[in-house]
Image (spheres, rainbow, N blue to C red):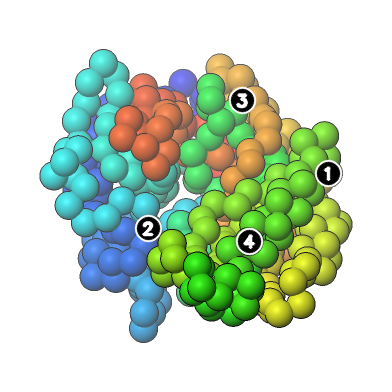
Amino acid sequence: MNAPPTLPRYFQARLPQALELLKHMVELESHSLDKSGVDAFAAFLAREFEQRGAKTTILQQPVRGNQLKAFWDSGRAAKPVLMLGHLDTVWPPGSTQIRPFRIEDGRAYGPGVFDMKAGILLCLLICGAFRDAAAVPARNVVFLFTSDEEIGTEAGLELLRMTAGECHAVLCLEPPLPGGAAKTFRKGVGTFTVKVRGRAAHAGVDHAKGANAIQELCRIVLQAQSMTDYERGITINAGTIRGGTASNVVPDEAEAEIDFRVPSLADSAWVEDRIRRLGPLDPRCTVEITGGLNRPPLERSDAVLRLYGKARSAALALGIDLGEGPSGGGSDGSFTAAMGIPTLDGLGCSGDGAHAGNEHVEVADVPRRAAFLCRLLQDLE
């Protein structure tokens, strides 16, 4: 194994080229619903991985963006390690014209740079280190990038589960917690759509003949939100509500989108059972409730903690104190953890502002994080 200082020096020397590559990646806009943009980004990354000696496969998708799989063959027979990321961002085309990539006060800014193009950059840097024999992984390494993570991973889920099922462990390159800490727990995330149908009537002439769908929906929303329990870690949030046509018409339709977050599958079952039992007080109204859990929780299991322990030891060997903690949001790592595969999330570059105008990564963390991940891949025997 290389002496600890070797990897930091290797990546530090390549930081200027890495930042140029990051700039280009940010400028290749890849909004979840922009298939052509995601496809172009996938094709670019495939060429970059191939230049670094990996074998790549672009998996064509009819509606969403294409997905990318790259494989580094270290000649080992053991199960590979999966490096997991996503190609898509929340930023629509044209965002980089409003907020162009820039480096200022040691930070690299730009739409999608923190979530999660800097994480993808780390994968390319690591693959380059393998090619240059600056690091030798203990196992084969699979790099997988889904194309619709930001909108639920519907197109990418089958490939994700199939790939992860063949792997020893999963390292997810989502942004870390503040201070660079890994994520050893994520809440499960779900959405319900509640539709109420009532009876329209003139609000002045025939008010009594109407059945107000908005009124019934509001009652249901209040009942749903009362299930929030901060001590248990359960939150319910009615995020959007629509209904009615005019103030002088008793509305016959109303609809709400309700987000819920839960710490465990048991809590998800508890929430879903109670939500689906909600109904109207006015018998003339009907209620339709659809949806449910979209991403399972990444529970802080013994397998997750053992993997974190190995990661912390690899980081300490390079003088990095890797912390750990929880996150209220979901990721593709939630799916792999629910499969029982040891998964460690939040291993991307330190920064802030995911999905916000101040989105950035700390430039100094790029070589440091790449060196740590290389060291971890060398240690995962």
Check disc 3 and report the residue beneath it. Answer: 322
Lower position in the chain sequence, tag 3 or tag 4 = 4
Dot 1 alpha-carbon crowd within 10 angstroms: few under 14, some 14 to 19, many 20 or more: few
The answer to whether residue 337 shows anywhere in this view is no
Residue 158 drawn at (x, y percent): 57, 75
Residue at screen point 54% across, 52% down? 239
Residue closest to the eye, 141 or 369: 369
**Based on the displayed image, in which of its 4 quarters is residue 1 positioned?**
top right
Amino acid type at circle 4 is Gln
Q: Which mark is residue 158?
A: none
Amino acid type at circle 2 is Asp
Check disc 4 and report the residue beneath it. Answer: 215
Amino acid type at circle 1 is Asp
Cα distance in 3D space between marks 4 and 1: 47 Å
In this rendering, which labeled residue sits more in front, label 4 or label 1?
Answer: 4
Q: Which mark is residue 302?
A: 1
Residue 142 drawn at (x, y percent): 51, 60
**Based on the displayed image, in which of its 4 quarters is residue 77 positioned?**
bottom right
Q: Secondary structure at mark 3?
A: loop
Check disc 2 and report the residue beneath it. Answer: 88
Q: Secondary structure at mark 2?
A: loop
Residue at screen point 56% across, 31% down? 177
Residue closest to the eye, 191 or 56: 191
In this rendering, which labeled residue sits more in front, label 3 or label 4?
Answer: 4
Dot 2 alpha-carbon crowd within 10 angstroms: few under 14, some 14 to 19, many 20 or more: many
Cα distance in 3D space between marks 3 and 2: 27 Å
Cα distance in 3D space between marks 4 and 2: 39 Å
Residue closest to the eye, 107 or 79: 107
